[in-house]
Image (spheres, grey):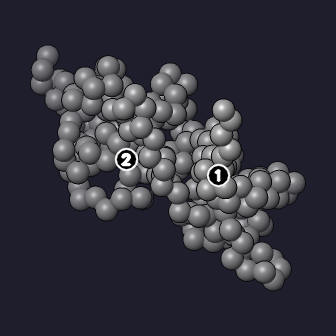
Amino acid sequence: MSQTTSQQEGDVIHDFLSIADLLDQTQLARIYAYLYREGEATVSDLIDALDLSQGTAYTYVNQLTDTGVLTSTKDTQPQRYAAVEIELTLTVDGNREYTISPALIAAVARRATNDTIDSYIDRHGVHGLATALSHTIAREHGETTHRLVADDLEISELEAEVILQALRPIVREHFSVEDAGASLADVADAENLDM
């Protein structure tokens, strides 16, 4: 027996695929993250800020607008664009949740300029980065330590601290956080004391 997909279910799939493109293509993530951070901008602003060619910038903006993650905020020329708020939570195996949010997209966007994030994604995938981002939020709220994160992620304490530090600026940009997390220097000092 065949089952037809409702329009609403089709919209959910379309939305998911649009977001998947942001997580898969660093340049798309960079454009979305820039517009989310800045509020709105023209394609010329994107070209200057992100060092994109004109053709690439227009292609990507059109693609993101067509998929619904960007919206045009002004009908007159030059058009201005803004990022649409994204919040999607996926549950895997009934117990692991991954939240796709502007913060995760910003983390993926930093892949182009941050070797730590780039290497982490290569080793652990975007889902691993999403988990590390969740731990970074908890760490910045003083709810965990790099040692607990290392145990949970099954990585070394040093690797845990390095990714927590790389994601810290993103967490601070996207969430209200008071100073709570240790710095890399604090970790090095603690390791020297353990010797």
Horizontal side of residue 101 vs 64, given as left or right: left
Q: Quadrant of residue 90?
A: top left
* Between 104 and 53, the one nearer to me in the picture: 104
**Disc 2 versus disc 1: distance between alpha carbons?**
41 Å
As drawn, which residue projects farthest toward the front? 1
Residue 170 point in image, percent of width and height: 43, 51
Residue highlighted by disc 1: 6
**Tag on residue 127?**
none
Horizontal side of residue 69 vs 137, given as left or right: right
As drawn, which residue projects farthest toward the bottom? 76
Q: Which residue corresponds to the image point at 12% horizontal and 20% vertical from the top-left? A: 194
161, above or below 110, in the image: above
Q: Is residue 165 visible?
A: no
Q: Secondary structure at mark 1?
A: loop
As drawn, which residue projects farthest toward the top? 195
Residue 101 point in image, percent of width and height: 48, 52
Q: What kind of residue is marked 2?
A: Arg
**Tag on residue 168?**
2
Q: Tell me the quarter of the image containing the N terminus.
A: top right
117, above or below 174, in the image: above
Q: Quadrant of residue 36?
A: bottom right
136, above or below 174, in the image: above
Horizontal side of residue 161 vs 77, given as left or right: left
Residue 64 point in image, percent of width and height: 72, 56
